[in-house]
Image (tube, rainbow, N blue to C red):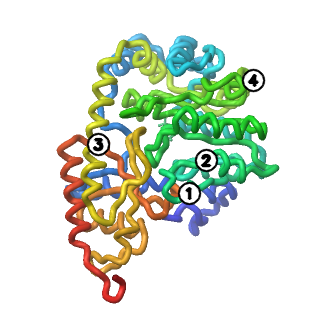
């Protein structure tokens, strides 16, 4: 990954603060940008790096935004967001069995900003944040900006990319302050079930940790899996949990930048105060758009989209099962990603280069087969590539055929295999 931003600019007299030099650009955004640059040059790249479902924004959201502009709903809103939206968001979150009041919900510019506020509000310099690996790329940097350190807990080999409560417990130190959970998980697509989740949450209860529960992909669960909200597990879980979510993924509204954090009242109040001095509030127009999405009856549309993505998920799993050297890891029944272990291709060659890492694999796959995937190093999954299966079916099938042909065409480095 580029480290350009982490070295002082030789021609600028401005000295960056240490915290600014320690935050690299997002690896997923970098690869996405690389793929888009090739596409702009006319190369037929199929981009499987994206972190968003390839559907249009739901129609009631777009209409509500137009109405907001037409009626000049274009001023500052209350810092925590407009009450109708906080109320609609609380209802939406509570479909999983939680009992949040509108006053406990703070509307933010995307789930990412909600996470930033959550870290800022909870973390003191030197604090440790426990997280099951593999994990989403932004977490370590969000933690570092708040002065904290992410402590990843790796799943055991062949444990389906899931960690156990015992593993978490063994990683707790006297600096541990937060357990960060992300279910359904990005990048692996695995979904922790009720019993598994309750066991992890018990570790936080036993060690008096706060829980940040990133549930941004709560709509995208497939097959037998069901979403379980951490704060719905028990009153003991709810009183220590900050639930993160938003409209980005469910309603295909990633560009509107509306997310939220739902939390015990004093935490919500502290976050509101921080937001009032930083963002003031999220965009008034986007808040109306989100309200449009949350208050329309979109059951049929959302179910259709879910079954579409489920088809694409199954197509991907089936196709990759027939590619020797690539192994889908865990049981990806959530989000819209999966992790493929590509270490079976190590030692093989393409364009005169020997593949020795998932980064080599991804680079050569893009250069030689015009398919973009994200290498897993920044997700703490160094031998995996993350595949996002949200692209339309004919493009997905073409991409999977290209991956199979790429792997089939790999040479053998002399003396290696
Ligand atoms: N959390 C996870 C796990 C994500 O994958 C993402 C987006 O990729 C976010 C949070 C951020 O969501 P938003 O676009 O609402 O900021």
Looking at the picture, how far across and down is residue 8, in whole percent? 61, 65
Q: Is residue 111 visible?
A: yes
Going 36% across and 84% down the picture, which residue do you hit? 416
Please state which of residues 252 and 156 is positioned toward the viewer in this rendering.
156
Ligand 1 within 8 Å, label 2 CB: no
Spatial CA distance of label 3 from label 2 is 27 Å
Above or below for 142 versus 356: above
Disc 1: which residue: 156
Going 44% across and 50% down the picture, which residue do you hit? 330
Tell me if 57 is positioned left or right of 359 in this view: left
Discs 2/4, front: 2
Quadrant where the C terminus lies?
bottom left
Discs 1/3, front: 1
Disc 3: which residue: 314
Q: Which mark is residue 164?
A: 2
Q: Nearer the N terminus, badge 4 or badge 3?
A: 4
Label 4 secondary element: helix
Disc 4: which residue: 266
């Amino acid at each position: 990954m580029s480290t350009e931003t982490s070295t002082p600019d030789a021609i600028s007299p401005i000295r960056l603060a240490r915290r600014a030099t320690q935050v690299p650009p997002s690896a997923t955004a970098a690869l996405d940008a690389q793929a888009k640059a090739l596409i702009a040059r006319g190369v037929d790249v199929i981009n499987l790096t994206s972190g968003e479902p390839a559907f249009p924004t739901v129609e009631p959201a777009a209409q509500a935004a137009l109405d907001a502009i037409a009626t000049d709903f274009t001023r500052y809103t209350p810092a925590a967001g407009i009450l109708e939206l906080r109320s609609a968001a609380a209802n939406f979150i509570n479909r999983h069995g939680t009992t949040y009041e509108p006053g406990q919900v703070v509307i933010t510019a995307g789930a990412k900003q909600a996470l930033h506020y959550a870290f800022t509000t909870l973390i003191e310099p030197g604090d440790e944040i426990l997280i099951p690996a593999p994990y989403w790329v932004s977490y370590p940097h969000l933690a570092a900006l708040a002065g904290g350190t992410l402590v990843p807990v790796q799943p055991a080999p062949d444990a389906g990319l899931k960690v156990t409560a015992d593993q978490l417990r063994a990683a707790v130190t006297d600096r541990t302050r937060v357990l960060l959970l992300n279910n359904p998980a990005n990048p692996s697509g695995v979904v922790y079930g009720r019993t598994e989740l309750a066991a992890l949450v018990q570790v936080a209860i036993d060690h008096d940790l706060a829980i940040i529960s990133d549930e941004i992909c709560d709509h995208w669960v497939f097959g037998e899996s069901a979403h379980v909200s951490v704060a719905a597990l028990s009153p003991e879980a709810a009183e220590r949990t900050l639930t993160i979510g938003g409209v980005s993924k469910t309603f295909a509204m990633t560009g509107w930048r509306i997310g939220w954090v739902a939390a015990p009242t004093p935490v919500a109040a502290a976050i509101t105060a921080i937001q009032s001095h930083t963002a003031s509030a999220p965009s008034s127009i986007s808040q109306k758009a989100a309200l449009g999405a949350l208050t329309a009856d979109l059951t049929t549309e959302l179910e259709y989209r879910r079954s579409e993505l489920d088809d694409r998920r199954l197509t991907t799993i089936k196709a990759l099962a027939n590619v020797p050297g690539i192994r889908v890891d865990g049981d990806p029944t959530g989000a819209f990603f999966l992790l493929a272990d590509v270490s079976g291709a190590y030692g093989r060659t393409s364009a005169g280069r020997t593949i020795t890492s998932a980064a080599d694999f991804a680079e050569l796959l893009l250069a030689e087969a015009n398919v973009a995937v994200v290498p897993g190093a920044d997700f703490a999954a160094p031998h995996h590539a993350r595949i996002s299966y949200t692209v339309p079916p004919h493009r997905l099938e073409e991409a999977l055929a290209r991956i199979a042909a790429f792997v089939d065409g790999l040479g053998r480095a002399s003396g290696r295999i």
